Image (cartoon, rainbow, N blue to C red):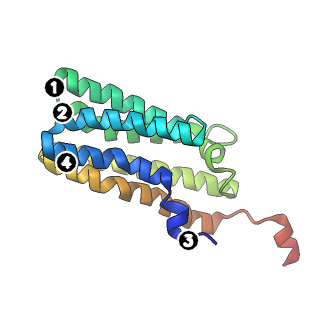
Amino acid sequence: MMSFAERYLNRSLLLEICPALVFFVVNFGWGLMAATAAVMLTSLVVVGTGVVLDRKVPVLAVVTLAMVLLLGGASLVFQEEIFIKIKPTVGNCLFAAALGVGLLFRPSFLVQTFGGHIQLTEEGWRVLTLSWIALALSLAGLNEVVWRTLETDHWVIFRTVLTPFAILGYILITRLLAEYYWLEDEDEEDED
């Protein structure tokens, strides 16, 4: 049986957290614009590394990269902090919208993404998707409150600390719902 660390603290998770850590360190050494450029470069490297190691193009990572490049580039070109500060809001809202649209498809986007690893009932997939949407929208709202009320350096700390907790939040929701909505194998039911 896999331990929690083996299952959830894998290479993919570490690659997801890497841009946030680079953003944090560079911001406090050289400021927000340098941190924006650094996170753009780091995101390119992370996605490229993922493609090389996994031999597939991760759609979510590519969409995130496009947003980082677009909004980070706008921050650098216009020398305006707001573009990089709204990136988490825009990203979480787009993620929630994509999940919502995914509910219209059969199988849903989450089933297409995780169906080989997680076996849930149809109701379980719907509840999981709605839970992820709620979390994404909560994170978007929280980002809006924080960047509008705190100084930039405090917002950077918030973003850096929140990133691993947000990822763990998705993992925890999935884990809890999987226990409740796990699709029992017909062979196991026959044996009982």
Q: x, y percentage for residue 57?
A: 56, 34
Sooner in the amino-acid sequence: mark 4 or mark 2:
2
Residue 89 image offset from top left, x and y in percent: 32, 40
Provide the residue designation for mark 1. 79
Left or right: residue 83 versus residue 190 is left
Whether residue 112 sits left or right of residue 99 in the image: it is right
Q: Which residue is mark 4?
A: 155
Can I make out residue 98 in this image? no
Badge 4 marks a residue whose secondary structure is: helix
Amino acid at circle 4: Trp
Q: Quadrant of residue 37?
A: top left
Q: Residue at x 20, y 33 (%)?
A: 82
Res 87 → quadrant? top left
Distance Cα–Cα, label 1 vs label 2: 7 Å
Indicate whether 77 appears above or below 185.
above
Residue that label 2 marks: 33
Q: Evaluate whether residue 171 shows in this view.
A: yes
**Residue 3 numbered tag:** 3
Please name the amino acid that badge 1 sits on. Answer: Gln
